Every structure is written in C-alpha cells, then in structure tokens.
C-alpha cells in the first residue's frame, strides 16, 4: 500500500550533514521509504496523503544503551561514583525484577515513555531474570519500540542470593531465554554485564553461544578509572580492558560497548579494527562522575559512535535530551583540552542520536529509500514567538533543544504509525 506524508522533512544522513526538504513529500510503500521529494511524482497522484502541514518530519531516535530495571530509580542516587553506585542503588533496584507483576507495570510505563518521546529503536539491558526479560520484550513490542534486549549475565560481584547467578545457571538461563524469544521486532542480544560481573567460565560460555548462534553482544568498557583498575587486577594477563572481552570471543563486529570514556589509543584502534561500536552516554558520565568522553577524538579516528541514555546512571530518557547532553559534554571537553578540539554541532549530535544508531539495525542513511520508516512529527507551535521568521533549519535546531513529548504529535516505527495525536491545524 502506498502512503504519502507531507511536511518539512529534515534528516541527517551523514555526520555534520543536514538534509532539509521544505514542504516535502515522503512516499511510503508498505512502510518502506520509496523517496523524499520536493514535488510529488505523478505516479503517486492518487495515493492517500497525511498532511502534517507546517510541522517537521524528523527521524526518530535510537537509544543504544539503557538499563530497563533501573527505571524505578530514575533521578535518584546521584551521590556516588560508579562502583559504589552499583552496589548501593542499582543492584538492589534490579533485584526487584524477580517479581513479574512489578516488571510488567514498570516495563509498560517505560515502553510508553520511550515511544511517546520518539525513541523507536533501542539496545537495552534487562536484569538477570529470564521471565522479566520476556515481559520487557513483550511490552516494548506492544508499544511499538523495536531493537535488541539482553538478559543480563552476572555470576560474581553482584549480591549473592539476591542478584547473582552461578556460571552454570547463567548459561542455562540464557539458553532458556533465547528459546523463548520469537519476535522479529524485539530480538535478543548477549549481555555480559561487564568484566567484573562475569567469571572467565561464564565469559567463555557466552563467547561460545555468540559464535554458535551468530548473536550480537553488548557490555560496558572503560567507564571509570576505578573500574579499569579493578579489571586489571582481575585479569593480570590482559594489558587492557578490551582484551578481557577479546579473550572469550566477545570482541567482534557489532559488539556494542557503552562509555569508552577512558579508552586509550590502543583500545580505540582495537575497536576500529574489530568493528566494535561505541555508545556515548554523556549524561550518565557526568552524573556518576565517570569522566568526559573525548567523543571528537573517537569520531576523528573513525570509530562508529552512537548515543545512549544509560538510564539510570543517566537521568534523561528522551533522546533529544541525551543529544544536547552530548553537545554540552563535548564543549566541556573542548575547554579541558585547551580549546584544541571541536565540540559537536547540533547537526552532528543529531546524526549520532538518529542515523548512527539506526544503521546498527541495518538501516541506510537518514530517510534513505529502502528504509522502513522510523520518524517523528514535531509541532513547535507552542514555542516562544521568535524574532522574525525562522528557517526550517533554525526550527530544527531549536526543536532539538526545546522538545517536550507534547510536541511529538506522531511517531512512526518500523513503517507503522504507533503514536498519533489529533492534529489541530497550525496557526499562521
Ligand atoms: N557497569 C556495569 N553495570 C553498570 C550499570 O548498570 N550502569 C553503568 N553506568 N555502568 C555499569
Ligand atoms: Fe550502563
């Protein structure tokens, strides 16, 4: 079925590049983009049109790292650095997800908050609980959020008896969990929490499962200095943190590594060589005093960088907030680097929060033909009146900073309209 969307179409196909089609036409066939046009080609003259008028049609967001079972502690416990924060706040909160009813309630709310804020693709950590992880996947799918979810593996340095498995249990539960994953829209990803949480035996089993089943892997890397020191003590045979994953076959193409704040030249080269993807989580890095990631350096070196909210180290679920946090962090980095590095522009950070993430799922650049549509429609009519008329590019930049979910009047995910608010004709 052909469907045509009309509005001001803006996307970021490549780093630093913004494509603006004022009063444009976006043609969809069975949810797949056929093209973005200045004028509607005659072949589509009789197709039904959804006219979004003066509103902006933008790519939706991809949140490439967040912890679903930390949603109940959003905005809390920001007084401790990473390792103390995990033991004091994160682990006790995650332990609650042994209760499927609690998981259902929390995950339904999380899924709704994600989709109404325009996040249609995620790579997400669950807890170690198999049932709760299935529930999370169901709730995301129900809301229209797509992507990857991982049952977390942790067999050491958790909370014995409360939030920790044995290596045997962890591997067996992972296999049982994988058997129960059937959706094409929300798929499994292997999730060793981080090196301090996983014994060598467990890492080896997960490496074997990843290889046998061709699964992607997500974890954490070089987030804080204390953590790096701990990893060094746990693996005296490894010179660097990344080698503790590589040793077990977990360092490979499409492996997602959150943070990479303190990755050195060697570790960054290893990322590029293997096709490991960095997830920059600027809000989290500041909140739990991990550091300020040199994101410009990662980009200059050709590393694939995406963005994550890292809920609940990060306290901002909306990706437009995460995008502006990344811009701010890059400006802090510029100052502490003696003004030698460039900060991220709005266009660049928007690319990282949209196209760079969508590519992980096989999508082409921006609204490329052939992509299933992942988009939001923004009504900026309630923003303060500007001095003089704004260009669409200016409206886009303002929206990135000023958006609230009430301004997101429609959300398209995987080619389907999953959020639709009644359109009041825009005044002009
Ligand atoms: N490293 C291991 N687990 C976590 C977590 O839950 N949050 C963050 N920010 N870092 C981690
Ligand atoms: Fe994290």
Image: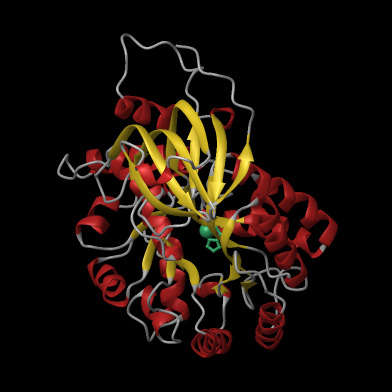
Q: Quadrant of residue 38?
A: top left
Instruction: Inspect this view and state whether residue 332 appears.
Output: no
141 to the left or right of 284: right
Q: Residue at x 53, y 84 (%)?
A: 203
258 to the left or right of 148: left
Q: Is residue 257 above or below residue 343?
A: below
15 to the left or right of 222: left
Ligand 1, what quadrant?
A: bottom right
Q: Nearer the viewer, residue 258 or 210?
A: 210
205 to the left or right of 159: left
Q: Quadrant of residue 125?
A: bottom right
Looking at the picture, how far across and down is residue 406, in whole percent? 59, 28
Q: Residue at x 43, y 46 (%)?
A: 27
Q: Is residue 15 above or below residue 170?
A: above
Q: Residue at x 55, y 19 (%)?
A: 425
Looking at the picture, how far across and down is residue 31, in whole percent? 52, 54
């Amino acid at each position: 079925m052909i469907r045509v969307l009309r509005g001001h179409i803006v996307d970021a196909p490549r780093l630093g590049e913004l494509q603006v089609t004022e009063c444009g036409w976006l043609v969809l066939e069975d949810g797949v983009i056929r093209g973005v046009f200045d004028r509607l080609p005659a072949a589509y003259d009789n197709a039904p049109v959804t006219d979004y008028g003066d509103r902006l049609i933008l790519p939706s967001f991809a949140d490439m790292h967040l912890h679903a079972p930390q949603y109940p502690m959003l905005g809390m416990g920001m007084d401790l650095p990473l390792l103390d924060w995990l033991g004091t706040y994160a682990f006790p909160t995650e332990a609650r997800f042994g209760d499927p009813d609690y998981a259902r309630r929390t995950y339904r709310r999380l899924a709704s908050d994600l989709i109404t804020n325009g996040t249609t693709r995620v790579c997400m950590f669950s807890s170690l609980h198999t049932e709760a992880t299935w529930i999370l996947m169901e709730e995301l799918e129900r809301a229209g959020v797509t992507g990857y979810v991982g049952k977390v593996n942790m067999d050491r340095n958790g909370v014995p008896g409360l939030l920790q498995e044995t290596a045997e249990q962890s591997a067996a539960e992972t296999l049982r969990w994988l058997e129960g994953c059937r959706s094409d829209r929300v798929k499994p990803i292997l999730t060793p929490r981080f090196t301090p949480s996983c014994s060598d035996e467990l890492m080896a089993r997960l490496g074997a499962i990843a290889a046998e089943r061709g699964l992607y892997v997500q974890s954490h890397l070089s987030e804080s200095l204390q953590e790096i020191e701990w990893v060094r003590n746990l693996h005296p045979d490894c010179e660097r943190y990344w080698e503790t994953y590589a040793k077990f076959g977990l360092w490979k193409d499409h492996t997602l590594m959150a943070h990479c704040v303190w990755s050195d030249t060697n570790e960054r080269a290893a990322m590029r060589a293997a096709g490991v993807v960095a997830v920059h989580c600027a809000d989290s890095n500041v909140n739990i005093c991990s550091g300020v990631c040199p994101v410009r350096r990662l980009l200059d070196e050709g590393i694939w960088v995406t963005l994550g909210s890292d809920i609940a180290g990060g306290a901002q679920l909306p990706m437009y907030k995460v995008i502006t946090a990344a811009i701010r962090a890059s400006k802090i980095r510029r100052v502490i680097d003696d003004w030698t590095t460039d900060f991220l522009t709005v266009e660049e950070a928007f690319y990282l929060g949209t196209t760079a993430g969508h590519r992980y799922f096989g999508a082409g650049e921006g609204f490329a033909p052939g992509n299933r549509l992942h988009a939001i429609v923004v009504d900026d009519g309630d923003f303060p009146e500007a001095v003089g008329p704004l260009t669409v590019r200016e409206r886009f930049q303002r929206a990135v900073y000023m958006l609230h979910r009430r301004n997101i009047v429609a959300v398209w995910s995987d080619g389907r309209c999953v959020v639709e608010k009644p359109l009041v004709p825009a005044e002009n």
